[in-house]
Amino acid sequence: MKTQKMIINLLIITSLLVFASCSFEKADHEPPAVPRGLRSITGDGEVMLYWYENTEPDLAGYRIYRSLTESGYYYLIGETNLDYFLDVGLENGVTYFYAISAFDYDENESDLSYELVFDTPRPEGFNENVFDYHDYPDYAGWDFSNYKVVAFDDPKCDFYYGYDDYMEAGYFYVGRPGGDIQDFGYTESLDDVTYAPQNGWSATGIVEVIVGHTYIFWTWDDHYAKFRVTAIGPNYVVFDWAYQVDPGNPELAMQ
């Protein structure tokens, strides 16, 4: 019996040593790799962040950080186990800086992402209508600063629409002196235009209206905007738009 008891005790001790050894070997102090490919899409009062997924099998998720300056303190605003994050409730016209980290189930956290990612939300709208100024002069113009339809001769009219019977085509006209307009060409969506270009403005302040084309506007008081024509009727145009309220900031969609 004594020998049997000694054997049992030896087996217990051996098991404990093996368990302790296994537990020690499984202890993880290695953080995941730093996430790569962080990028943003500008929205109306929001910013969508995307990045490449990490491949670690013990990955638990990502932490999202935000700052108001490039070199300032980045504070935690959320966590996700997806490869995207929507930051909402932001102020249009304010620039936000972002970074993310990855963490595992043992709470090991990577360094912050290396990319410099910043975004400035701006207002936008969809399915707006302006009409031919020959037929409906009070509903032919658009005021970016107030996001509304105005008369073609309103002092705040940025651009207005008119149809030329002789040319059998519609045209956008710069409404307020000092503004500039250009046809950026066909785009799949409004967000295909990321930044307003510095060149390419119409020498006459007039561009032809074409479905699917996106137009860039530079207001008299140094604000950039864009709008994309989605439909043309007998005497009207339907368009989507975005307007950057931060003066001189050409950022209109994705960084």
Image (spheres, rainbow, N blue to C red):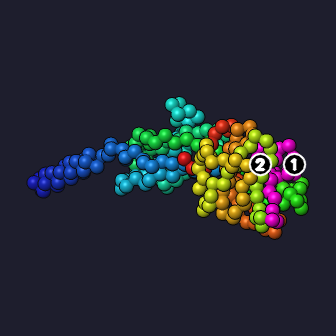
Q: Which residue lies furthest to the left in this view?
A: 3
- For residue 144: magenta? yes
Say whether marks 1 and 2 touch (CB < 8 Å).
Answer: no
Q: How crowded is mark 2: few (under 14 residues within 10 Å), some or many (20 or more)?
A: many
User: Residue shown at 89%/61% (left/top)?
Assistant: 135
Q: Give the range drawn in magenta.
A: 141-166
* Percent position of residue 24, x then y: 26, 45
Quarter of image, res 187 = bottom right
Tally the numbered discs. 2
Of residues 15 and 101, the one nearer the viewer is 101
Residue 234 in view (yes/no): yes
Residue with the mark numbered 1: 153
What secondary structure is marked by label 1? loop
Side of 98 relative to 212 (left or right)? left
Q: Residue furthest top?
A: 72
> What kind of residue is marked 2?
Val
- For residue 214: magenta? no
> What kind of residue is marked 1?
Asp
Side of 72 relative to 110 (left or right)? right
Side of 18 relative to 165 (left or right)? left
In the image, is residue 137 above or below residue 98?
below
In the image, is residue 125 above or below residue 70?
below
Of residues 113 and 23, the one nearer the viewer is 113
User: Residue shown at 46%/42% (left/top)?
Assistant: 115
Residue with the mark numbered 2: 174
User: Residue shown at 72%/59% (left/top)?
Assistant: 208
* Percent position of residue 230, x then y: 70, 64
Of residues 235 and 203, the one nearer the viewer is 203
* Percent position of residue 255, x then y: 54, 47
Compute the Cα span from label 1 to label 2.
Answer: 11 Å
**Closer to the N terminus: mark 1 or mark 2?**
1
